[in-house]
């Protein structure tokens, strides 16, 4: 049984490879150089030569501002790419795991979103990811769509210039007298290690469908930063940014907390609180170094 991981050198993809390896599975690590998911022929050719029984797609165009500027390309990758993978997964009779996003929601609910809540994205990124989900539902037979939120991991996020929020805060704390962080966007910061383990667990069964998969609980970016500094005992002058101090160039949901209702119904939810996930990340990434 081979697991093909697409986006294998990405922030999440590298941890997905590690999670399946730890579970004793053979992995094919596919990067953008091996295939471009927006091309059906290229996708078919590459995956047909691997003949995986499981395909995990972590690839996306997910820099929110770039998606706005290059909306056609975002649609090709996030929507048509998902469709292409569904077609090839069906041809190969492979299970398909597709990673999606909390940004399919507009944030107006103000309570954690469950899988059955209607999705009304605010921006091109969210719309193209939602279109990708629709193609998968329509085309794939054995699929898991896994929506997640605010990822951080040991491997650099390629779409966002390499440094995740945790690492950025710790770097800036060493460089600046004061840090100011927004308090009006609420998320569930999720460790890619924990998400990768959850994906490896979920695909063992055949409960196909849509799943929310984030750390438990939620916080604003300001609260996240404060907790990073508390756990690492970093002395820094941290303050809440004034409203409109960092005006968003692209509309984003102010509240995108996901409830892992589907995983909980199956008794499969393996996520701890975001604070525990963060503590583990800091212990393995910093203290052990
Ligand atoms: N990061 C977050 O906070 C966050 C939050 C919610 C959901 N997500 C979702 O989580 C997934 C993984 O995110 P991540 O943080 O691991 O991203 P990442 O580090 O940017 O990794 C994405 C990977 O996909 C590859 N890729 C991009 N376009 C491709 C294409 N057309 N064909 C094949 N490969 C392509 C990239 O390669 P190149 O860099 O060489 O192009 C990279 O290896 C994405 O689906 C994203 O939408 C992320």
Image (spheres, rainbow, N blue to C red):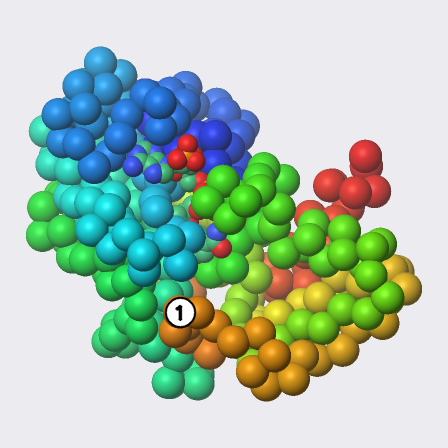
Q: Which residue is mark 1?
A: 250
* Identity of the residue drawn at 52% across and 36% down: 15
Percent coordinates x, y for residue 222 in the rendering: 67, 73
Q: Nearer the viewer, residue 172 or 222?
A: 172
Percent coordinates x, y for residue 109 in the rendering: 37, 85
Total tally of numbered discs in the picture: 1
Percent coordinates x, y for residue 176 in the rendering: 82, 61
Judged left or right of residue 246, residue 17 is left
The image shows residue 247, relative to residue 150, as above or below, that is below
Q: Quadrant of ligand 1?
A: top left
* Identity of the residue drawn at 61% across and 50% down: 164
| Residue 162 visible to an observer of this rendering | yes
The image shows residue 287, relative to residue 70, as above or below, that is above
| Quarter occupied by residue 108 | bottom left
| Residue 207 visible to an observer of this rendering | no
Quadrant the C terminus occupies: top right
**Residue, far top:** 49
Judged left or right of residue 50, residue 140 is left
Q: Nearer the viewer, residue 69 or 146?
A: 69
The image shows residue 103, relative to residue 45, as above or below, that is below
Q: Nearer the viewer, residue 8 or 20?
A: 8
The image shows residue 236, relative to residue 166, as above or below, that is below
Q: Secondary structure at mark 1?
A: loop
Judged left or right of residue 154, residue 143 is left
| Quarter occupied by residue 224 | bottom right
């Amino acid at each position: 049984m081979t697991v093909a991981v697409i986006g294998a050198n990405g922030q999440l993809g590298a941890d997905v490879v590690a999670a399946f390896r730890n579970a004793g599975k053979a992995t094919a690590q596919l990067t953008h150089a091996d295939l471009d998911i927006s091309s059906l022929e290229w996708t078919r050719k590459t995956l047909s030569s691997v003949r995986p029984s499981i395909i995990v797609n972590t690839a996306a165009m997910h820099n929110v501002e770039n998606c706005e500027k290059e909306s056609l390309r975002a649609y090709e990758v996030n929507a048509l790419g998902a469709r292409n993978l569904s077609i090839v997964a069906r041809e190969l009779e492979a299970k398909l795991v597709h990673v999606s996003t909390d940004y399919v929601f507009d944030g107006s609910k103000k309570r954690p979103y469950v899988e059955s809540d209607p999705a009304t994205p605010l921006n091109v990124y969210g719309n193209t990811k939602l279109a990708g989900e629709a193609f998968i539902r329509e085309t794939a037979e054995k699929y898991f769509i896994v929506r997640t939120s605010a990822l951080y991991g040991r491997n650099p996020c390629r779409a966002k210039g390499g440094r995740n929020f945790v690492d950025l805060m710790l770097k800036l704390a060493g460089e600046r007298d004061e840090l100011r962080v927004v308090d009006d966007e609420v998320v569930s910061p999720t460790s890619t290690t924990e998400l990768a383990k959850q994906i490896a667990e979920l695909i063992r069964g055949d409960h196909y469908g849509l799943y929310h998969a984030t750390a438990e609980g939620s916080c604003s970016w300001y609260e996240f930063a404060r907790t990073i500094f508390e756990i690492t005992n970093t002395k820094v002058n941290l303050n809440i940014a004034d409203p409109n101090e960092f005006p968003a160039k692209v509309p984003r949901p102010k509240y995108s907390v996901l409830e892992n209702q589907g995983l909980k119904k199956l008794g499969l939810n393996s996520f701890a609180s975001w604070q525990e996930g963060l503590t583990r990340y800091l212990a393995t990434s910093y203290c052990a170094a």
